[in-house]
Every structure is written in structure tokens, then in C-alpha cells.
Image (cartoon, helix red, strand yellow):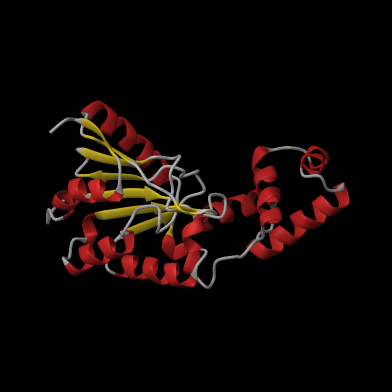
Amino acid sequence: MPQHMALKSDLELHARITPLVELYDAEWVSAARDLDTWPGARESARLRIRRDGARQARKLFSPAALADEHDREVLREMAAHGMQVRITTTPLLQGTVFIDRRTMFLTDPASSASSTHGPRHRTYTMSAEPALVSGAYALFEAAWETATDLAAFFDADRPRIDAQAREVLHALGTGMTDVTASRELGMSLRTYRRRVAELLVALGADSRFQAGVRAGEWGLTRG
């Protein structure tokens, strides 16, 4: 088999990936924007659960995977059966699957499942070139280490902060002065300081430093 090849359709992808998926002990690692980045991703996850191979699987998603309640239930099912699931803010424009760290499948970032004009043709790249696979896998590991465990997003005690509060939290982490931060965020100094105070209350923190620590513990700085 060639070590590097283009797959021009979902059918070609299935033909190449199915024999590898059926390997009972195969490690399955993937990164995707959401549950529809890959065709049949939901069914594939359930198949691994039924075959008790879930503990060999890690799945990394962008926050887009949490947008739909049905999708959240699928993610909960994955995690409940032993799959490791994390959410990252790192852009995941190109879906990636690694099988046993030896074979890699990439989605074409220019193709997607659908568009405003209806279904769009999807293409993929398959590679078993050791240097390429190991390099891409190292990038996956870096994103995985900075991602947040799925359970943190469903924890009832996890503080909920809005998008503007996240920007304030980021500004605090950069060490900018209040004057500079307020200007960067396009708000008045008074508004910025009020948002900082609200953030301290939301995180149950007594200081800006403690707010940063607690935000990190909850994965809020990454989610």
C-alpha cells in the first residue's frame, strides 16, 4: 500500500479506514470541529463502545461540538463508556484521525459536509509516512494537553462566564494595565474595572491572581 494517498470521496475513506477500525486493540485518536466533521462519526463511536474498545480512544473537539443538545448527549455517552473526550479552543479546521500512531487520515480543509448550497464533496488524505504521522501526532498531543476535560463543561458547579468576561480574564493574564486593557477591549476604564470585580465574584476569588488560578483549574482560560 502507498504510504501517502488522496481519497476522493467518503466511499474511498470508508474502504481504507474500516479494516483499521475493526482492529480490536487499535488505539483510536481523533481531532474534529464537531461530530459531523467525519462521515458516520457517531455510529463509529457507538461501534467502539459496543466492542469495548472505548478505553483505547481519545477524542478532541472544538466548542462547536457542544452547541447541540443531542450532540452533547452523544459526547456524554462516549465519556460514560470510557472514551477520553476533551474540548479545546485551538482551531480545528482540519479533522485528523490517528490509528495506532501509524496511520493518519486528514480531512481536506477546503471541503465540508455541507454548505449553503447543499452537500459538498469531501476529500481526504491518508498517510502512513512515519515522519508525517509522528509530527502531526505531536501537534495533537500539544493540543490535547491544553484542552479541558468534557466533564468540566457539564459540572454544575463550574462558573459560567460570558465572552466579554473571557476577554477580561485573558487581559488579566497578559499583565496589561487596566488602562491598556480597557482600551484594547474597547470599553471605558470604569466598565473594565467593574467587569473585573464581577469576574472575581463569579470565580469566588479574593484577588486577580487567585482569579487566574481558579480559572485555570476550571479550564476557563482554555474553554
User: To which quarter of the image does residue 130 belong?
Assistant: top left
Q: Residue 134: x percent and y percent? A: 27, 32
Residue 104 or residue 124, whichever sits in front: 124
What residue sits 83% from the left and 40% below the top? 179
Residue 122 is at least partly visible in this image: yes
Image-based side of 208 in relation to 192, left or right? left
Q: Quadrant of the N terminus?
A: top left
Image-based side of 147 in relation to 223, left or right? left
Residue 188 or residue 211, whichever sits in front: 188
Q: Residue 64: x percent and y percent? A: 51, 57
Image-based side of 221 in relation to 78, left or right? right
What residue sits 32% from the left and 70% below the top? 80
Measured along the vertical axis of the image, is residue 58 above or below residue 181?
Answer: below
Q: Residue 79: x percent and y percent? A: 33, 65
What residue sits 50% from the left and 43% below the top? 91
Measured along the vertical axis of the image, is residue 41 above or below residue 184?
Answer: below
**Tag count in the figure?**
0
Residue extending farthest to the front is 117
What residue sits 31% from the left and 60% below the top? 40
Residue 58 or residue 178, whichever sits in front: 58
